[in-house]
Amino acid sequence: MTWLWTSADLVAAMNGRPIGNLPQGVTGISIDSRGITPGEAFFAIKGDRVDGHDFASLAVANGAALLVVSEAKLPALGRLVSPMIVVPDVLQALVDLGCAARDRTAARIVAVTGSVGKTTTKEMLRQALAPSGAVHASVASFNNHWGVPLTLARMPETTDFGIFEIGMNHAGEIRPLVSMVRPHIAMVTTIAPAHLGNFRDLEEIAAAKAEIFEGVVPGGHALINRDNEQYAFLEKAARAAGVSHIHGFGADPKAEFRLLDFVSGPEGSLLRAAIGNQTLEVPMGAPGRHIAENAVAVLGAVHLAHGDIEKAMAGLATMQAEKGRGRRYRLAKDGGWFTLIDESYNANPTSMRAAIALLRDAEPHGQGRRIAVLGDMLEMGEHSPAVHAGLAEPLAEAGIATVWLGGPDMAALRDALAETIETTYRETADELAAHALESVRPGDVLVVKSSKGTGFSRIVAALLDKYQAFPEREGRS
């Protein structure tokens, strides 16, 4: 049996108090009593809504090898008979274990932040580095105060490359996370008006993202989007943090890792890039210029991490967009099919424009339409009316003639759209889902884009539930 952690190492890392007959070790770390795998340790974290201690019995029933619980909660666990490690604070114990995981590994560590593209870039890095060694990367968007230490704690000692996504909603949130991760390479994908309601301007957002440079190990690297207007600010911040090597990526002629050319297709793209001393032609399995730009950053990171560039290119060629982040579905309808592009995970003005560009480059079938299904961008604060109305311009430039809108903030875009654009507006995601189910036609291409909290993923789910996947080989024309 290969243990992720021996029980002795768990106790030592967390300075915990063992109770009962601890197993020799555990195969994994979990904070979810429902999804725990037999042999894993269950950490009973107290969250904003639920307390993991309330589900300790369920974790044991589902196969937890041991429990990590709070000293204060121990009396409330009653007669629960299970091996335990008792600590003053379970979340802090997870942080301590994550730091121990970072201390014991010789892996090259890459940390990714940015206003847009963190998770997609992290997944591209996972695929690009996999042929070069054992890769450990965060699951989904585990990028906050519990997701980062959990990802660290799950990292095997034998990892060759560790990839961590680090997110924030407010200033000061990245600093403690990157101090745990201590990356060799810190990447900032871009700075955009995300969470704008929590900041005065883009420079404040850039300053918060720049906290990632404070954790870079001596001799490490910063990888910054040179096409972004905040590049100079970020470069200065990286130097102030003591980062030894600062690299730019993008189409800018001064970029060290440079996008030379980009040819977009409806379901993929081809890019030419200068990486190190090589000029590479890289076929991409997912379309969109924003994907290509981040792919250049990924190849730059592979180069800096001493990975195999040729094998990384092959990995990028086979990548698929993630659920909620551009994944495409071809769905049967009335003897034909339509295309659904799921961008429902999150949204800000920059990612909205990227999604509109994706729709512009997509190819309707027959008499099909390009349809933008757009919902509110949250956390825009006082800027909300202006940034929503501001989407009228990219929609017009892209030639999108059909727009379906939902949510109170999208009323500003409804009022700003030209009369030549066929516009449907509903107050809620569920009302708009009903409209989509009845109104979609064979040949259409729909992009569904909104902030996660609006529930626009239910529109995607409703379409996937009603219409079956169309066989790929029959669907192509």
Image (cartoon, grey):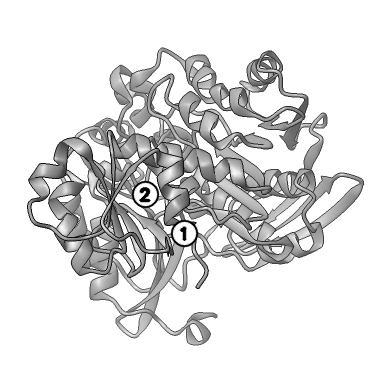
Residue 267 shows up from this direction: yes
What's the mark number on residue 213? none
Q: Is residue 425 above or below residue 366?
A: above
Which residue lies at the image location 42% right of the left edge and 69% below the top edge?
329
Tag 2: residue type? Tyr
Dot 1 falls on a residue whose secondary structure is: loop
* Lateral position of residue 464 relative to residue 162, left or right: left
Residue 148 shows up from this direction: no
Which residue lies at the image location 49% right of the left edge and 64% below the top edge?
3
- Residue on which disc 1 sits: 322
* Lateral position of residue 198 relative to residue 289, left or right: left
- Locate residue 124, reporting x and y percent: 60, 55
- Locate residue 164, reporting x and y percent: 54, 44
- Locate residue 435, reporting x and y percent: 19, 59
What crowding class fits label 2: few (fewer than 14 Cα within 10 Å), some (14-19), or many (20 or more)?
A: many
* Lateral position of residue 240 relative to residue 386, left or right: right
Contact between marks 2 and 1 (CB within 8 A): the answer is: yes
Label 2 – label 1 distance at C-alpha: 10 Å
Q: Quadrant of the C terminus?
A: bottom right
Quadrant in the rendering for residue 195? top left
| Chain-order first, disc 2 or disc 1 | 1
Q: Nearer the viewer, residue 161 or 5?
A: 5
* Lateral position of residue 217 relative to residue 311, left or right: left
What crowding class fits label 1: few (fewer than 14 Cα within 10 Å), some (14-19), or many (20 or more)?
A: some
Tag 1: residue type? Glu
- The outermost residue toward the right is 277
Dot 2 falls on a residue whose secondary structure is: loop
Q: Nearer the viewer, residue 375 or 85?
A: 85
Which residue lies at the image location 37% right of the left edge and 39% below the top edge?
93
Which residue lies at the image location 51% right of the left edge and 38% below the top edge?
99
Q: Is residue 133 above or below residue 246?
A: below
- Residue on which disc 2 sits: 345
